[in-house]
Amino acid sequence: MRIVHYNLTTTAKEGGVETFVWELSQLQVRRGHQVTIIGGAGHVERAISGVQVLRYPFIDRMIWRRMRPLRRHFELTKLLERLSMMPTALPALLQARPAIVHLHKPYDFVIAPLAHAVGAKVVYHGHGEDFYPSDRWLVRGVDAILSCSGYNAETLIQHYGRVPTVVFNGFDPAHFAPQPPNLALRAQWARPDEPVALWVGRLQPWKGIQYAIEALALVPPERKLQLLIAGEGTYRASLEALIHRLQLQDRVHLLDALPHREVRRYFAIADMVLGTSFASETFGMVLCEALACARPVISSDWAGFREVVLDGVTGWVVPRQQPAALAAAMLVVLDHPIEAARRAEQGRARVNQLFTWAAVTGRVEAVYERLLARRDTQSVV
């Protein structure tokens, strides 16, 4: 089967959607498919044998936002960014003559008629809530819709009026697995008697990292808990100001964004991993990978996390945007290491059953096959 994954950011940035495209492509090649990734000109490189990677220039959304009428229209600037790549990318798409064109953002719905012109079926995989004017009309050109979680499926049903197939995000069990901590790495951030809490993600207000910092301020200093924050984003300056205001410079450490393959080394030195989002998060990928490494996790009660972390079973779930509740859970993890390890191990068993890339790839392939078996263009659900 010839498959094209069409997504500008796959080759231009690091992130959950981008990782999904790379990992799925790798498994699809191993299963005998011909896979091409069409993305934007960028710095992201992955050495995946058998996957053809094509990169095309585009006008970055931040350039579009310099125009006064567009400054507050983030969805529109993302759409313009995508449209700017199409004149050079679409000829390659047509030349590939794929059986399946797999889209990962709704901004690319506009290419569906061209994909149909060469006999391809179009699959859209929902990873978030990137809605914009006219997308409800353009989605008519999509033959099948997938969603990354049950929560995301409900969102797509409400917006598009179509029922998607749920295909959870995945992880590599050969990479994300328990491993001994690198003591030299740990020593960079904490003394031997100082426990470590880890937060990984983009630095955005809705990710809730500010509440983790405020929670740390409620943990008695004599507990010596250190908080590592690994990520980049526009919220960094605000977080730095909060750390300074709370006088936590010696207990909170702002790292740069970690390459995805490096994250497990930081999981291994962490006594707990935090998920603090209170909006937009459709699936707790970081928490899933942390559980795969048998690390204790504390998550907010945001809907996108609930399918990964089961309160009292695989981790702790606390009310979102509530620093006191988060601080209390952090102390429980510190005070009850045996229970923390038990829940982490149960979490590891569960994510290895449900969320591996092999399971994800099989579910996606089943949708492709059902779609291609149909003689009309009615959506597969």
Image (cartoon, helix red, strand yellow):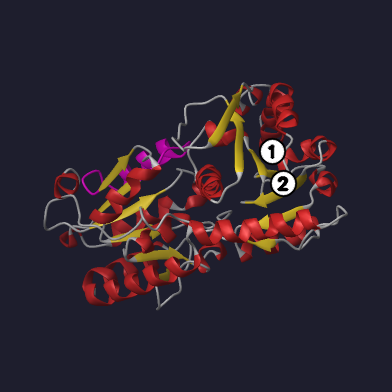
Bin the neighbour count of mark 2 within 10 Å (Cα to Cα): few under 14, some 14-19, many 20 and up: some
> Given the current orientation, which residue lies at the most extreme left position?
192
Sequence order check, earlier mark of 1 and 2:
1
Number of residue marks: 2
Picture quarter containing residue 83? top right
Q: Amino acid at mark 2?
A: Phe
Q: Residue at x 72, y 55 (%)?
A: 145
Name the quadrant of the C terminus.
Answer: bottom right
**Residue at x 12%, y 51% (from the top left corner):** 191
Instruction: Locate residue 135, reporting x and y percent.
Output: 79, 44
Please check the rendered image and state whether residue 239 is part of the magenta-colored stretch, yes or no. yes
3 horizontally vs 117: left or right: left
Dot 1 corresponds to which residue? Answer: 75
Is 320 above or below relative to 342?
Answer: above
| Residue name at image x 17 percent, y 43 percent | 188
Q: Which residues are magenta?
A: 230-251
Observer-nearest residue: 107 or 69? 107
Instruction: Identify residue for label 2.
Output: 131
Question: Rounded to the nearest whole Å, what is the CA distance between mark 1 and mark 2?
Answer: 7 Å
